[in-house]
Every structure is written in C-alpha cells, then in structure tokens.
C-alpha cells in the first residue's frame, strides 16, 4: 500500500470470535516463519523457500495470502539486500553475507494474517546486523504504542524516532495497514509522522505494523517486474512486521512473541 494518510475508511472492530480465527491464522504465520528461519542458509534459492512455504501452509490447512493477490505470482515475498519489499522468489541462490526479508501471509477460514522478518545468511556485516536490530526494535516500540486510547500516529512516531536516532531512513512509499477478511483494510499506518494524529485506537482493532528501514536514503523504486521495490541508492534495507490486536492493555501480537527492544 502507498501513501502517508493515517486512515481513510471505517476501521472494523473485530468480535471475540473473529479474533479467535485471526489467532489461528497468526499461529500459522508464526510456524511458517520458524520453518523459513531454519531453512535460510548459503546456497538455498528463494524459490526453494517459496516451495517450502507452500508445503507448510498446505500442511497447516491454510492458504497463502499473497499468491494471486493483484496478480502476485508467488506464495511469499523474498527481498534480498537492497530489495525493500515484494521481491519475487526465483532461482537466485543466497550467499553468505546477504540479508533477506521474508514476508508471509496466511488465510484461515476467510481471515488474514501477515508478518515479516529480515534474516542473515551466514555471517553478515556489523552494519547489516545493526540495521536489522534497529528495525525490529522500532517495530516493538511501535507495537508498544498500539494501546486503546492512543492515536494511530503514536505508532508511526515511535518507529520514526527510533530509526532516525540511529541514522537510518524510514521508507515512506509503503506503509502498514489494517487486516481482517481482507489483506489490506483501513487504516493505513505510516512509519513516520508527528504523534497525536489519526484515529483513536480501540480494543478489537487489528493492525499489521511493518517498518521498512534503509541504511541510506529513504527513496525506493520498483523494478520492471512490477513488484520488487529496491532502494534508489543501492543501500541495504530491512523489514519486520507483526499482526497485532489492540486490547484494553498492551497489544496482543498474533504472529509471534513480544521482544524487549535492545535499547
């Protein structure tokens, strides 16, 4: 999704029964990511990762949220090094020193879940590791702001503040989103902006929060395949995402466990 708007359209409040199905979809995504983490290593092709994902989704009784979405040709997205998001799996072999963003989504009983991690391939540079750490920490700080009574842009501001304090750039062309019976629902959730704006968060809202962060400039471009977004300056990029539910207390992470930010 594109654009900096903090949400146009009605934000659906999920019922307890809807949330229960979305927890199931989230557990599928969590298990799939664990399988992929164990499989990312030098010499593996991104197409092999896609085939593994299909097998795992099928075994778990789910479908890919991405395959066929606006014509997307694969089950997962695999974005390597300067690829920001929406990289299409191929016969490309991963090599030591690469970083790969793996974005996955599931459909269970008509409800969607969406999450992403960036993984190291063998030993990586200190800069690449720091980028990954900061991006994941920014996600967790954003999730911390996803509390009933806060404003939507409180999430955005927490992410931007963390990222820019480390000298990195927040991608602005792509944003997080609401999620439910569709992969993308209102609201859009930018990863930048002043706090205190946008809709008031309410219990039952389900959001996919996903910072995309570059070591260089923020600008991206889309390759001729119509999907793969890369950094314009060739710098490294990282992407982390969780689907979360707003509650009366801290947000419930549907696609994984809570991690304490490193600093």
Image (cartoon, rainbow, N blue to C red):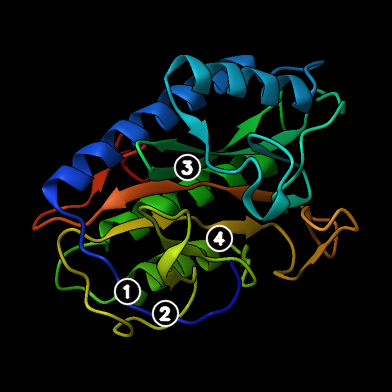
Q: Whole-Å distance between the Cαs marked 2 and 3?
A: 20 Å
Q: Residues within 10 Å of mark 1 (few under 14, many from 20)?
A: many
Q: Position of residue 117 (x, y in %)?
A: 54, 38
Q: Residues within 10 Å of mark 3 (few under 14, many from 20)?
A: many
To which residue does mark 2 refer? 6
Q: Which mark is residue 166?
A: 4
Find out whether the residues at labels 4 and 3 contact each other: C-beta distance under 8 Å. no
> Residue at point 47% right, 42% down?
115
Q: Whole-Å distance between the Cαs marked 3 and 1?
A: 19 Å
> Residue at point 27% right, 63% down?
145
In the image, 14 versus 177, the foreground residue is: 14
Q: Residues within 10 Å of mark 4 (few under 14, many from 20)?
A: few
In the image, 217 versus 54, the foreground residue is: 54
Q: Which mark is residue 152?
A: 1
**Numbered label tally:** 4
Q: Which mark is residue 85?
A: none
In the image, 119 versus 50, the foreground residue is: 50
Q: Reply above or below: 241 against 23.
A: below
Mark 2 / mark 3, whichever is N-terminal: 2
**Residue 262 appears anywhere in the view:** no
Q: Whole-Å distance between the Cαs marked 4 and 2?
A: 25 Å
Find out whether the residues at labels 3 and 1 contact each other: C-beta distance under 8 Å. no
In the picture, measured across the screen, residue 218 lies left or right of residue 63, that is right
At numbered mark 2, what does the secondary structure look like: helix, strand or loop?
loop
Q: Which mark is residue 115?
A: 3
Mark 4 / mark 3, whichever is N-terminal: 3
């Amino acid at each position: 999704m594109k654009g900096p708007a903090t949400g146009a359209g009605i934000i659906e409040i999920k019922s307890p029964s809807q949330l229960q199905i979305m927890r199931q979809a989230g557990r599928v995504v969590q298990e799939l990511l664990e399988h992929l983490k164990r499989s990312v290593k030098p010499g593996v092709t991104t197409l092999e990762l896609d085939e593994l994902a299909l097998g795992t989704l099928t075994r778990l009784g789910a479908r890919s949220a991405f395959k066929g979405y606006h014509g997307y040709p694969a089950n997962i997205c695999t974005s390597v090094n300067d690829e920001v998001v929406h990289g299409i799996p191929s016969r490309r072999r991963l090599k030591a020193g690469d970083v790969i963003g793996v974005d996955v989504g599931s459909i269970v009983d008509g409800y969607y879940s969406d999450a992403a991690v960036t993984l190291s391939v063998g030993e990586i540079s200190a800069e690449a590791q720091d980028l990954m750490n900061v991006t994941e920490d920014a996600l967790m700080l954003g999730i911390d702001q996803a509390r009933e009574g806060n404003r939507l842009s409180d999430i955005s501001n927490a992410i931007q503040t963390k990222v820019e304090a480390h000298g990195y750039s927040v991608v602005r062309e792509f944003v997080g989103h609401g999620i439910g019976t569709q992969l993308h629902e209102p609201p859009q959730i930018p990863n930048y902006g002043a706090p205190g704006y946008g809709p008031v968060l309410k219990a039952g809202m389900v959001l996919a929060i996903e910072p995309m962060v570059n070591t260089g400039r923020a600008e991206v471009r889309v390759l001729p395949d119509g999907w793969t977004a890369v950094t314009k300056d060739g710098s490294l990029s990282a992407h982390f995402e969780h689907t979360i539910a707003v509650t009366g207390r801290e947000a419930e992470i549907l696609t994984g466990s809570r991690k304490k930010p490193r600093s």
